[in-house]
Image: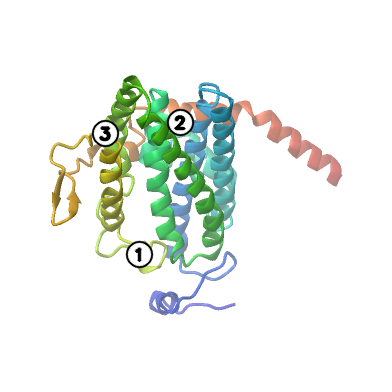
Amino acid sequence: MRTWSDLDEFESFLDDGGMVEAGDDMPQVYRDEVFRFIEFHANSEMMGGLTERDWIPRAPGLRLKQIFLAKTQDEIGHAHLLYMVAADMGIKSRTEILEDLFDGRSRFHNVFHYQAVTWADQIAIAFLVDAAAFASQRAVFAECSYGPYKRVLKRIISEEGFHMRHGEEMLLRLSNGTDVQHEMFQAALDRWWWPSVQLFGPDSPPDDNLLRWKIKSERNEVLRHAYVQKYVPLLQGYGFVIPDPELREVDGQWLTGEIDWEPLKATMRNGGPDSARRIDTAARNWADTAWVRASLDAAIARRAA
Ligand SMILES: [Fe+2]
Ligand SMILES: [Fe+2]
């Protein structure tokens, strides 16, 4: 097995396009940080999937119910894949990762700490949040030195692409709808614009290890800027107002007003507006399904005996 005498040697291997696999030797700092990153992503898929699930009974019409059912399965499937990749890094078992999430000891994306108030919020989530997640995941996939993560990202991204297109279709229908529908989406946009922009995180630090180790391929502020360039004209084109009085166009570039990072920081402490309810719902879901895990374990034990 390839071993590393120091971090410099490992980093030059990564600079030459080297890929790391689960059983490979890797510096502990790389193992720890990549694990934390994948755990965060996995938890976000899990909490996102539970949000989608909440809306299956409320989705208007059979077609949309089917779509939300499929989307829920996609998101929970993404979480499953990522939890396997994370657990294989040998830091925490899958159960420990889940228990940390349900006990509020770990983190997940800021956007899943807010309440979806109306059906238009679900459209805003599909249009804005899935697109932001898609952009940030694609930027990880572009390089991604950790092989197992890169391989599951390929599938996740292809499914996220469908979610994004679905968001575009729903927004198009709504923007051609009644005045009430228009107002509903505007109200949802007022709630979801800033959380979506903040999903990319504050500016990357100059010494960001995840960039140096080719887990991320792009700085947070670059991705955020590209997102704003795409979504400001799109939303304005549909006749909506971006809730940012300082938004301006300078030399063909859209610049936002100063971003208040306090809401993001609060979500990272699990102190967002809907954090407690969401974590509690997820924890109860885990507790309510304990009998399924126990039955499966018992069946496996019986077969082995
Ligand atoms: Fe997903
Ligand atoms: Fe998605």
Callout 1: SS = helix
Q: Which of the two discs, 1 and 3, sits closer to the camera? A: 3
The residue carrying mark 3 is: 240
Type of the residue with mark 1: Leu
Q: CB atoms at circles 2 and 3 under 8 Å apart?
A: no
| Alpha carbons under labels 1 and 2: distance apart | 30 Å
| Alpha carbons under labels 2 and 3: distance apart | 32 Å
The residue carrying mark 1 is: 211
Callout 2: SS = helix
As drawn, is 252 to the left or to the right of 296?
left
Residue 164 is labelled as none
Categorize mark 2 by other alpha carbons within 10 Å: few (<14), some (14-19), many (20+): some
The residue carrying mark 2 is: 279
Q: Quadrant of the C terminus?
A: top right
**Occupied quadrant, residue 114:** top left
Q: Which of the two discs, 2 and 3, sits closer to the camera? A: 3
Residue drawn at x 85%, y 43% is 303
* 10 is higher (above) or lower (below) than 180: below
Residue drawn at x 25%, y 53% is 225
The answer to whether residue 33 is seen in the rendering is no
Q: Is mark 2 within 8 Å of ligand 1?
A: no
* 297 is higher (above) or lower (below) than 251: above
Q: Which of 55 and 100 is in front in this view?
A: 55
| Alpha carbons under labels 1 and 3: distance apart | 35 Å
